[in-house]
Amino acid sequence: MLGQQTGSGERGDEPREQRESRGLVGQSLPFAAAFVAGFLLGRRRGGSDGEATEREGAIRDLGGADEESAGRLSAVANRIKSRAMPGDAGSASAEGADFESGDAERADAEPATDQPSSMGSVAGEQARQREREHADEPSETHQEAGDTDESGDASPDELDAVEAPTTRGMPMLGLGTYGMEADDECFGSVRAGLGMGYRHLDTAEGYHNEEAVGDAVAEADVDREDLFVATKVSPDNLDYDHVLTAAEESLDRLGLDAVDLLYVHWPTGEYEATDTLDAFAELREEGVTEEIGVSNFTVELLEEAVEVSPEPIFANQVEMHPLCPQTELRQFCAQDDVDVELVAYSPIARGDVDDVEELQAVADDHDATPAQVSLAWLREKGVTAIPKATSQSHLRENWLSLGVDLDEADVERIDAIEERRRLVDPDEAPWNQ
Ligand SMILES: NC(=O)c1ccc[n+]([C@@H]2O[C@H](COP(=O)([O-])OP(=O)(O)OC[C@H]3O[C@@H](n4cnc5c(N)ncnc54)[C@H](OP(=O)(O)O)[C@@H]3O)[C@@H](O)[C@H]2O)c1
């Protein structure tokens, strides 16, 4: 993880013992602060009065803020307010208009922004339905996943008990942000995730939320060097000059000096292996990115990328979960002369893993949930997972998957699942050519 420190610094420099001594109030603060700041950002970026009232309610629902925490909340609020300069607000609302009009599913399907229009209709509606069903209430599975207080807030001890392992400096459990298009939602979820222990954030130029992710990083009580931030360059920015400009623009939006990992989002549009990867190599040499990644690459495309890239390819981010096990790609990436990390997107199949009998059975054996088992299975395979979650219950459930240890028999049972399902499957995808 990078050495640059671009966070607010104020609380980031606080000694660890001091942070730990804040106990439950301290642990709850990130959530409370996230909601206060989200509320203010919502206003700054043109949130409607109705939305503001809803967020004010959410802040009140957190309840129990003592004098000390009220003081901290107001300090956070002031910091956010002080950044909401008129010019800033103007450009932000112009961007806001963009993602408000966009289909929430586009970003990870259509090569331009991620979701193909052809699949947006079916998978998109299913995901939206799931989002409606899961919206923010602590679920039963959440209650089973560990001891919780009545508010659904995370218990500090429980969260502290787990830590994400790293692979070559990359935390193997991260937070995906695709679909977090509203600034306040993205800010709040990322801020809450960071408060829980997530240290790997996955965003993209095409998600239109880099600024909100950057705001959450700036407000978090986490040193930059302890954080792993990944973003992606869209397919329409993959010729040499466009890559250089797009990367700088991503850094501006994120408010960072450099990212840890910069991906080619899709090998489509302007992608041309030599031209594109030469530009990525230049960015690595200049320190704009620590590592170079690709995404949605098949074995053939990855083989070509590894061969022509002047700098090593660090990771390939692809859809992977027990219904899409990527066996061939996994074997290829593990070869000594390839040595590419796999990062699994849609690692819980957007909630579909809940319906898989074998995963339910393994989950029962471990007093866990199918989503947690899916994440634990990926870890057993040496694969990094970046589940997206906006609700606190999902954020926490996924984080606590780090405490689920599968044995060989569990892994074999999951490997034996025959059902296959790919959720992100646009016509333009290389595997459909
Ligand atoms: N490179 C690419 O082309 C590409 C493509 C797709 C995704 N991605 C990246 O990968 C990340 C994750 O993939 P994804 O968002 O497609 O799918 P995902 O992480 O498998 O699923 C996210 C959905 O599942 C829900 N959820 C989260 N935790 C849950 C749990 N424990 N139990 C049940 N439901 C749960 C979320 O609900 P709530 O939000 O309501 O909590 C959300 O609706 C993305 O956010 C993005 O960063 C990259």
Image: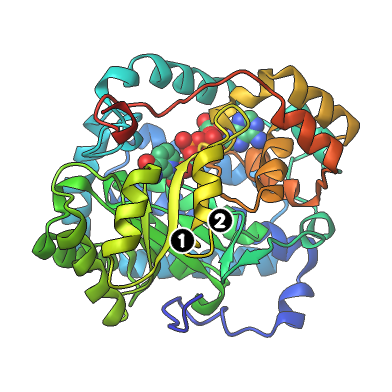
Above or below: residue 61 compared with residue 102? below
Q: Secondary structure at mark 2?
A: helix
Name the residue rendered at 40%, 35% in the picture.
Answer: 51
Please give left or right for residue 224 compared with residue 235 in the image: right
Q: Which mark is residue 27?
A: none
- The mark tally for this picture is 2
The image position of residue 370, as x and y in percent, is: 73, 30
What residue would you read off at disc 2? 334
Q: Position of residue 69 (x, y in %)?
A: 66, 65
| Direction from residue 7 to residue 321 in the image, left or right | right
Q: Are the residues flagged by discs 1 and 2 in contact, CB closer than 8 Å?
A: yes
Q: Nearer the viewer, residue 226 or 24?
A: 226
10 Å neighbourhood of mark 1: few (<14), some, or many (≥20)? Answer: some
Residue positioned 31% across, 62% down in the render: 307
Residue 347 in the figure: left or right of residue 426: right
The three-letter amino acid code for the residue at tag 2 is Ala
**Is residue 305 or residue 351 the one in the foreground?**
305
Q: Work out whether 358 lies above or below 373.
A: above
* Amino acid beneath label 1: Val
Residue 169, quarter of picture: bottom right
Query: For the residue labelled by badge 1, is the local secondary structure a helix, a strand or a loop?
Result: loop
Q: Badge 1 is on which residue? A: 338
Image: 314 above or below 366? below
Note whether 3 is above or below 208 in the view shown. below
